[in-house]
Image (tube, helix red, strand yellow):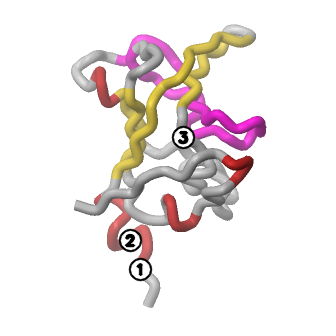
């Protein structure tokens, strides 16, 4: 039996740091230090037919109300490196933490960790 997401999906979180905030053609992008090379499932590139956002929050602004619609992207030079697309979130700045919930399954172990020679991430089990 391979229980995967059913058993542990909700038990994990994925955290990455905002490196930059960019506006392009009226769309706000939060560029983070993490992406599909660390959490392929959240990017929608893990065999999903329809891409859906995982629940996402700005971890350093949990008490703040959503202020804008943003897309959270990784640092890779591919348009597939999207962790969240057009989500209402509090305004974030470089240094803030992005939290991707329901990341207990198919995270780091199912991701192309060495993609484009980016450094490996740390996975912590508590």
Q: Distance between the Cα atoms at labels 2 and 1? A: 6 Å
On the image, which quarter does residue 10 sit in?
bottom left
User: Dot 3 lies on which element?
Assistant: loop
- The answer to which of marks 3 and 1 sits earlier in the sequence is 1
Q: Residue at x 70, y 38 (%)?
A: 76
Say if 125 sits above or below 70 in the image: below
Which residue is pictured at 65% across the width and 15% down the height? 27
Q: Is residue 34 above or below residue 124?
A: above
Q: Residue at x 45, y 37 (%)?
A: 16
- Label 3 packing within 10 angstroms: few (<14), some (14-19), many (20+): many
Name the side, left or right, on which 21 lies relative to 93: right
Residue shown at 41% from the left, 21% from the top? 95
Q: Is residue 63 left or right of residue 34?
A: left
Q: Where residue 69 sits in the image (x, y, percent)?
A: 52, 19
Residue underneath mark 3: 34
Instruction: Kindly report which numbered mark, 3 or 1, lies closer to the viewer in this rendering.
Output: 3
Q: Which residue bears the numbered disc 1? A: 3
Give 17 or 28, whichever is nearer the viewer. Answer: 17
Residue 78 shown in magenta? yes
Instruction: For marks 2 and 3, give the one nearer the viewer.
Output: 3
Depth check, front residue: 10 or 123: 123
| Residue at the right extreme of this rendering | 78
Query: Where does the N terminus fall, quadrant-wise?
Result: bottom left
Residue hosting label 2:
6
Element type at mark 1 = loop
Residues drawn in magenta: 66-90
């Amino acid at each position: 039996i391979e229980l995967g997401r059913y058993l542990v999906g909700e038990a994990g979180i994925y955290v990455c740091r905002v490196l930059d905030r960019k506006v392009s053609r009226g769309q706000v992008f939060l560029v983070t230090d993490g992406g599909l090379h660390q959490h392929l499932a959240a990017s929608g590139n893990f065999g999903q037919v329809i891409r859906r956002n995982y629940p996402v929050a700005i971890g350093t602004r949990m008490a703040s109300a959503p202020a804008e619609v943003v897309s959270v992207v990784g640092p890779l030079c591919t348009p597939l490196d999207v962790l969240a697309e057009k989500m209402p979130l509090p305004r974030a700045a470089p240094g803030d933490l992005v939290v991707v919930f329901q990341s207990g399954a198919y995270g780091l172990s199912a991701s192309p960790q060495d993609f484009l020679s980016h450094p490996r991430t740390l996975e912590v089990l508590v």
